[in-house]
Structures are given as structure tokens and as C-alpha cells.
Amino acid sequence: MKIAFVVQRYGAEVLGGSEHLCRLLAERLSPQHEVAVLTTCARDYVTWKNDYPEGSDRIRGVVVHRFANQLTRDLDAFNRYSAWIYTHPHSRADEMEWLKQQGPWCPSLIEHLRRHHQQYDVLIFFTYLYAPTVLGLEIAPSRSVLVSTAHDEPAIRLEIFKDVFSRPAALCYLTESERRFVNGQFSERPLIEEVTGVGVETAQNQPYPRMPQAADEDTSPTADGPEGAATAVSEDDGLSHGVASHLLARGAVFRRRHRLYGPLVLYGGRIDPGKGCEELIEYFSSYVKEGGDATLALMGVKLMLLPEEPFIRFAGTLSDRERLQALEAATVVVCPSPYESLSLLALEALSVGTPILANARSAVLVEHCTRSNGGLYYADRDEFVECLKLLIGDARLRAALGRNGRDYVQRHYRWDVVLAKYERIFEKVRNAR
């Protein structure tokens, strides 16, 4: 079967929730199908400037066709226009202008799709929000599948998105929470709807040795101290040659590389106020003022200034392998975003048995916590501080939550389960035509 993914950005270097999920799915479908990706030349979602060259490329077995954006985004002007359109009566033309200002604005991608859509059996659009989806779904709706990654935000109430959620042949959700939200928001939807989720790579499939973390494991510095011989161990130094067991303990490589000792709270993703990071730092500072002794480490792309505090560490952008090591090293993984349609960070943490502390304003994160019994959630500063104190202080609780989290991911987010759901959707779309 020939499958085309349409997404606003694409690439191994592109860090973004929906874009990352799109790449994971495209790569895992490519052994069974002829997969192509239609995307823009942008790497940066703030300006949408053309960083990649136009043309075709192959990334991890997937053919990628890139098209140049016609415009870059003026973020201040767009924010002013958004504030107006969300609060004033307006026309459909106003909403289309909003879509254009938001970006990416890539007429050549849409023109290519108009000319060549018949060569594909299925078109999969990732994310409801952007122009490639809004305009692309008009071209061949009977062969289109939308992975909406929807959540409660002002933009989704614009009239143009009623067509987006009613046009495709099938609609895929990442969680039950997303499905309930979309069902409440849009009365006209496709006949084919499915909670597909996404697959999560489990720790057992990773290539380096590891030892289980005991419930009472002491992650404080070893006797030789931070300057001792043990810190000389690098990622591959002797890991398969009989090194002392404490050097193979969960997360030891990440901790020693970044000189992190004692309780560790980890965040991963875009370090951005919109992802709840500003609030996270404020809440974590309150935890420290009340006597908390953990360190907050942030990994990912930094899009905001971080305070120069001894209890805050910036780990930078990590490889997939280093990211897994960081998740294993963490005492707790915090998920502060109030807007989530899935939260791969939460699922990856649960998959390695690390409990999560999540923002209760996100229905998806609350769903992960309650369905897995693998984490706690907070609604305000006081709850954040008390939950964090409880998790840091109770190793047996962390161990129990960790076991529950691993079981949850194994039951619901294995790749074989997810891919089987997509195969059934493709068959239903073909049969409906």
C-alpha cells in the first residue's frame, strides 16, 4: 500500500510532539508499506523559516519530500491577531488569514498534493491545527486519515476546524481523553474513529546493559566522591567487561556525566513557558524553600531563560539513548504541560518504571496517572510541593508506582498493538471507498 504522511515539520532533529509521533509511525509502517512524507522546509515552528533544502530525501527508510514555505511568521503580530480573533466576531476570511499568519504557509505542498494525490492509497494528516492539514484535507477526503492530536485550546473553537474534523474518512485519537473532548466539541465526525495511541520503545529493547533499581536504592554519591575514579566511567567504558555493579545501576551513566547526586526530578521536551516550564520552576523553587533537597534537571531545547540556581540543571538536547538513561536516572519525572494530547514524556517515564508527577489541568495526564496508577497529579503549588515530598521520601511507593507504570505501557502502548489498529483503519478506508 502507498501511504503519504502530511505534516508541518519532519526530521530526526525536529523536536515536537506531533512531529515526533508522525516520524515514529512513518518509520514503523515503512517495512510493510511504501511510505512518503510531504512536509515543509522548516525546522523551527516559531518562524517557519526554510532551514532544509527543497527536494526529496530519505530519512531512516522513509522518503521525504520538502516544499519551501512562502512566508515566515511574525510572532508578535500573530499573537495580537489571535487575541483579537478569539474575542471578537469575525468572518471565515478572517480565520483563513489567521491560519496564514500562524504558518506554515506552503502553497507548493498543497499544489503537489492536488497533482499527485491519486498515487497514494491513504493520506495521513498529523495535527488538526496547521494549514497543510486544513487545506490538504479538502483534496481527497475519502482517502484521508486525521491524527488530530487535539486538546482544549482557544484555536480549536474556530469555525474552520469544524470542516477539519468532519471531512476525513477516519479520525485517530491518542487517548480516551482526547476522544471524549473531540466528541463533545464536534457533532459531525467520520464514521471510522479509533483510539490508536502510539507505540513506546521499552527499555528491554535498548542495547546497553542495565540493572533493576531496588526500592531502597541509594542514589547519593559513592564514597569516592564526584572526583573519584568512578566518575571516569563513560557511556561505553567497560559496561560489558565486569564493571562494579553500582556503575551499571539504573541511570548511573547519566548521573555521573552530569554530576547529579541525590534525588533527581526530570523534565524533558521544549523548555518553554507554553509547556508549563515557567510554572514548574516557580513551584520547584517553593519545594526547595520548604526544605526539599532534589535537583531539577531539564533536557530538551531551551526556549526561555533559566534562573541561575544550584538546584536547576540544564542537560541540553539528548540522543534517544541518552534520553532513556535520563528517564531511568530520575527519581521522579515531572510533566508540567497543561495542554497535552498524549505526552510521550509521561509514557516513556512509565515504560522504564519511573513515577510521574503531572499537571492536573491536562485531562490526558490525569488519565495516564489514574489508569496506570503510576503517578500523582497536582492542581496548584501546594499540591505540587506535597506530592513531590511524598514521592521523593517514599521509595516503596515509587517502586510500586514504577511497576504499575511498566504494566500500563505494556498493555496499551506496544507498537504491535498500535500498528495493528492502523492496519485495520486502512482496510476500513479502502472498503468504504
Image (cartoon, grey):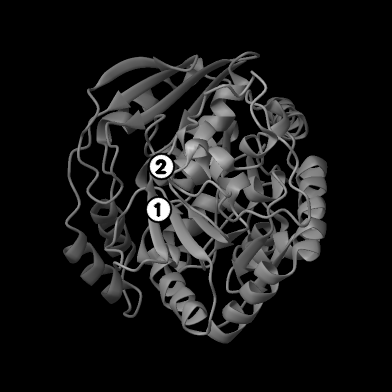
Secondary element at image label 2: loop
Q: Decide which of 94, 245 is in the foreground and name it.
A: 245
Question: Which percent across, then down, holds residue 366?
Answer: 68, 67
Disc 2 residue crowd, few under 14, some 14–19, many 20+, Cα 10 Å: some
For the C terminus, give its image quadrant: top right
Identified at 56% across, 61% down, the residue is: 335
Q: Is residue 146 visible?
A: no
Q: Tell me: residue 321, above or below residue 298.
A: above
Q: Which mark is residue 78?
A: none
Residue 27 in sight here:
yes
Disc 1 marks a residue whose amino acid type is Arg
Identify the residue under disc 2. 15
Is the residue 308 above or below the residue 67 in the image? below
Specify few, some or many for label 1: CA neighbours under 10 Å numbering under 14, 14-19, or 20 or more.
Answer: many
In this image, 53 relative to 240: left or right? left
203 relative to 224 in the view: left or right: right
x 58%, y 56%: residue: 341
Residue 25 at x, y percent in the picture: 58, 30
Q: Quadrant of residue 309?
A: bottom left
Residue depicted at x 30% and y 37%: 43
Q: Is residue 38 shown left or right of residue 361?
A: left
Do the residues bearing badges 1 and 2 touch, measured as CB atoms within 8 Å? yes
For badge 2, the amino acid type reads Leu
Q: Report the side of 263 relative to 412 (left or right).
A: left
The image shows residue 285 at horizontal and vertical percentages of 44, 77
> Under tag 1, what secondary structure?
loop
C-alpha distance separating marks 1 and 2: 8 Å
Would you name the residue on which mark 1 appears?
270
Q: Who's the residue at 39% across and 57% down the image?
A: 313
